[in-house]
Image: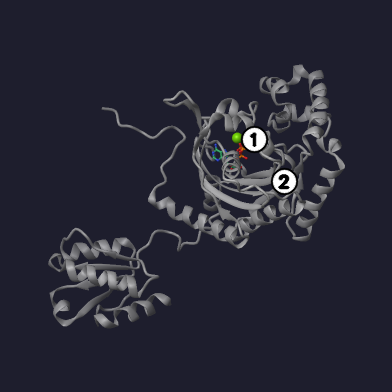
Amino acid sequence: MTKIQSLRGMHDLLPDQTSTWQYFEKIIAEILERYSYQEIRFPILEQTELFKRSVGEATDIVEKEMYSFDDRNGDSLSLRPEGTAGCVRACMQNGLLHNQTQRLWYTGPMFRHERPQKGRQRQFHQIGVEAFGLKGSDIDAELILLTSRFWKALKIDHAVTLQINSLGTSEDRLRFKDELVSYLTKHFEQLDEDSQRRLSTNPMRILDSKNPVIQTLLEGAPVLADFIDDESRDHFSKVLAVLEAADVPFEINHKLVRGLDYYSKTVFEWVTTSLGAQGTICGGGRYDGLVEQFGGKPCPGVGFAMGVERLVLLLEALDVVPSSVSHGVDVYIVAGSEHTVPSMVLADRLRDQCPTLRIESHCGGGSFKSQIKKADKSGADIALVLGEQELSDGTVGVKYLRKQHPQESVVQTGLADLLNLFFTD
Ligand code: ATP
Ligand code: MG
């Protein structure tokens, strides 16, 4: 029988990888907490219509990347390709947007049927942050300062740069789109197949094209910045003023449009050159029209999402994960198989008395020699040995596995002090 394998582009995270993930998630969650953002959780599966209406019918995501299927009732459902749509839906449905502001974050898997490669998977993970009910530029700036603090805490700030742009209002973009389309139509023959198709479906995405011929052609194209109204312009310059004052360097990229339809005004991406082709680690922007688009009362929103796999790859590439961040054991308890009861009791008492230590009890029996071998392999610094002699004396053998020091016999009541002292150095 053929063995069942995981789906292409959907990966297992093995125990030796999860410690880095936990390190990363802990740093991010702590900073979010310090900025007073609260976690929200919402389903992975939603009605397909939710994503069509928000992400946009003519985007790559909805056109060709969604995992959609009809369930047993014949309803069209989709695995979420991103988090903003579900987050907005959850907030609306639960009345969180009514006369109040929200600063929220979430984390979890997202699904897109893309061609798998380094930094691009079909199931991948994002940490997303959304702020609702705030229309001023201050919150846009806050979100960017927040991301900047992430990179500093993770020690990757030297390897990432911020690109930022303003998309103006949807009316601004309509006028711009008209001009862009008429310019590109004049050069239709020079467009590649993808761009020819996008010309009628989603012309702004052509600005994103990596094709050098298109990039040259775009040099003569109208520029979105020239179409942006005064209010958006003012909003943008206020965001930039905070970044300048806070010493967060940025590059204005007039071609940055992002792949989702719902953005307006500020958009930004953090990019790195250390990961090859998949260099965007975080992207976001303002989406003031989205709630209304879902049938709610107008409510401004702004947010971003970062790709966890890419960030973990970057941490590894830059070798900035502290060496203490790997699975480890401090103390390994070895006992004769007839002494299971006292050794389990000892282990649990030590877990009460030494709450910062990682203590592994040997299970499964075997000779003292083979148990000590396991203790050594576990990476523990100390093995505690509980044999016949120790039990009758009320002592424990303390064997130092990483330093030249003879085994000691310690009374059980003094053990916690000894361990706490040993591991604070
Ligand atoms: P890309 O330009 O790489 O296609 P995107 O613009 O489609 O990214 P967003 O929808 O903005 O990406 O998602 C935010 C972040 O999620 C990205 O910056 C990236 O770090 C990550 N991401 C997006 N798609 C994938 C994927 N298929 N695999 C891994 N990470 C991804
Ligand atoms: Mg994409």
Neighbourhood count class around disc 1 (C-alpha, 10 Å): few under 14, some 14–19, many 20 upward: some
Q: Specify whether 200 is left or right of 32.
A: right
Which residue, as the protein is rendered here, is positioned at the far top? 189
x then y, percent, for residue 420: 37, 77
Q: Secondary structure at mark 1?
A: loop
Q: Quadrant of residue 399?
A: bottom left
Q: What residue would you read off at disc 1?
A: 294
Q: Amino acid at mark 1?
A: Phe
Pick whichever, 54 or 219, lies toward us. Answer: 54
Q: Quadrant of residue 169?
A: top right
Q: Specify whether 310 is left or right of 8.
A: right
Q: Which residue: 18% across, 68% down?
A: 341
Identify the disc placed on residue 161.
none
Q: Quadrant of ligand 1?
A: top right
Q: Please tell me which of labels 1 and 2 falls first in the chain.
A: 2
Residue 158, visible in the rendered structure: no
Q: How many marks?
A: 2
Q: What residue would you read off at disc 2?
A: 163
Pick whichever, 115 or 259, lies toward us. Answer: 259
Q: Which residue: 38% across, 80% down?
A: 421
